[in-house]
Amino acid sequence: MEDDGSFVINGEKTWISNGGIADVYIVIARTSAGSGPKGLSALVVEAGTPGLEIEPFEVINAHPIATLRFNECRIPRSNLIGEPSMGFKVAMANLDVFRPSGGACGIGFARRALHETLEHTQGRHAFGKALSDIETVRVRLADMAVELEMATLAVYHAVWATDMLGGRQSHLASIAKLGATEVAQRVIDSAVQLLGGPGVKRGSIIERLYRDVRPLRIGEDASDIQRLIIARHLLGRDGPGPVRGHK
């Protein structure tokens, strides 16, 4: 609601990353009448704004997250990002940036998991030989490496396209996010399997990675949402898809 040159925000939003430690928040609020994305604007809200209550809570990994409650928070019009009623587009463009970064985060987790697994399987012996000399172990290690490299290329492709082609590359951002985080989950799960007991020991590197990677498949919209975005592009629902010209 707009009042005397300022926007007054009421309501709440939960599952806010960096809630409780951020100095400012970007809030998408309805500032004019309209259904769906119409009437939504993007506003900068400082952490110390009167009427803003921040309630942090814990999740399975060490990630700061909170519920934000707004009670008659008065935000000056100068805090508006972009044009009024364009907040939804601002939010979606922001996701196009953060989805590949979420994928890159998953790649980092998976690379560390593969490194730890290689060290363990070469140093651990069973049946008179190193685990890495067992064929089934080698097959799993190879699968981990192949998936990791393919996911890495998907992330590189998304950021390259954004830098070189310009405009929004939403489907590539979703491919990077979906592919890399799903691969990271599988690679780290394989690491747990190959390490056995040490892989689930509380506080061990692999155990921490296992807890850290799971939320990545939810943040910046869950994996199934990424699939819908990719399918919509393939079907030409957001403009010509990559199958253009094929009959």
Image (cartoon, grey):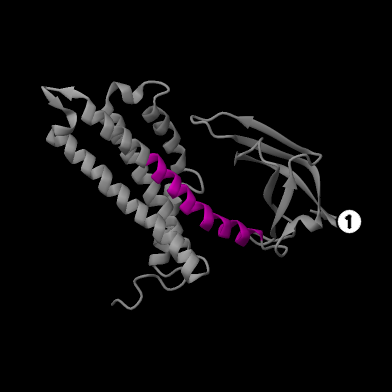
Is residue 196 in view from this perspective?
yes
**Residue that extends furthest to the right in the rendered view of this protein:** 4
Name the one closer to the observer, 216 or 23.
23
- Region rendered in magenta: 87-110
* Residue 126 position in % (x across, y down): 15, 22
Residue bearing mark 1: 4
Name the one closer to the observer, 58 or 121.
121
* Residue 246 position in % (x across, y down): 30, 76
Relative height, residue 153 to residue 194 (above, below) = below
Q: Is residue 31 magenta?
A: no
**Residue that extends furthest to the left in the rendered view of this protein:** 128
* Residue 185 position in % (x across, y down): 36, 40
Which residue is found at the position 47% from the left and 69% from the top?
164
* Residue 73 position in % (x across, y down): 79, 44
Left or right, 54 with respect to 104, comes to: right
Left or right, 116 with respect to 131, comes to: right
Relative height, residue 219 to residue 54 (above, below) = below
Is residue 238 in view from this perspective?
no
By secondary structure, the bulk of the magenta-drawn segment is best described as helix
Quadrant in which residue 12 is drawn: top right
